[in-house]
Amino acid sequence: MFDIGFTELIVIGVVALIVIGPERLPKVARTAGHLYGRMQRYVSSVKSDISHEIQLDEIRRVGVEIKNSAELAALDAKQQVSAVDDYLRDEASSINKALTETAATATAGEPPANEPAMKETPEPVVQQSLPLDEPDQNLAAGAPSAVGEPADGETAGKTA
């Protein structure tokens, strides 16, 4: 803030010595030091209060944003629940309608038009079991392994 060099301090000291005098100069310097310290503490206090208020303002703003996002999420959830509820009600009414039509046709003695006359039952699928306890039979039969030596035809063209 202030750019005071050593030469300016010497000039201020000489002027103070001449104006105040040598008897009162130590007392005035001590009082000036105390006032300067109080000023620094006050400025530091004001800075910390301002930064504290800025932090509180940021916290309030984040709190409002969180509240707004929570309200939007709740509104969205309500809309989705309403849509699912409407869908389920429509499905339930269509099922009830189909049941009443089926009951009406069953009392008339006719088979329902949308069901086949004879239902086919699918055959059960049989899963194949693998013998896990037996060793691999390909290795026992003398089959070449993947890390084995090259075939004779490959080594015939190469010279060492």
Image (cartoon, rainbow, N blue to C red):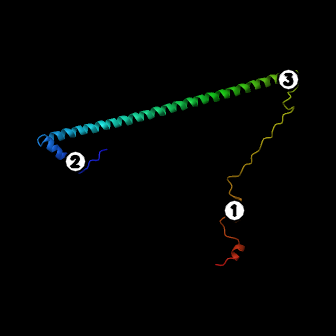
What's the amino acid at mark 1?
Leu
Circle 3 packing at 10 Å, graded few (<14), some (14-19), many (20+), is some
The one nearer the camera, 159 or 33, is 33
Query: 18 or 118: nearer the eye?
Result: 18
Quadrant location of residue 94? top right
Residue found 21% across the figure and 39% down from its top? 32
Instruction: Give left or right: position of 146 versus 116.
Output: left
- Gap in Å between the C-alphas at discs 1 and 2? 98 Å
Closest to the observer: 110 or 82?
82
User: Where residue 135 sits: x, y (%)?
Assistant: 68, 57
- Name the residue tied to disc 1: 139
| Percent of width and height locating residue 63 | 48, 32
Q: Position of residue 137 (x, y in %)?
A: 71, 59
Quick one: SS at disc 3? helix
Q: For the residues marked 2 and 3, what is the alpha-carbon distance in whole angstroms? A: 113 Å
x 22%, y 38%: residue: 34
Residue at x 69% of width, y 75% of height: 155
* SS of the residue under disc 2: helix
- Label whose residue precedes the other's in the sequence (2 or 3): 2
Query: Is 131 left or right of 20, judged from the image as shown?
Result: right
Q: Residue furthest bottom?
A: 159
Q: Which residue is mark 3?
A: 105
Residue at image point 49% right, 31% down: 64
Q: Quadrant of residue 55?
A: top left
**Sooner in the amino-acid sequence: mark 3 or mark 1:** 3
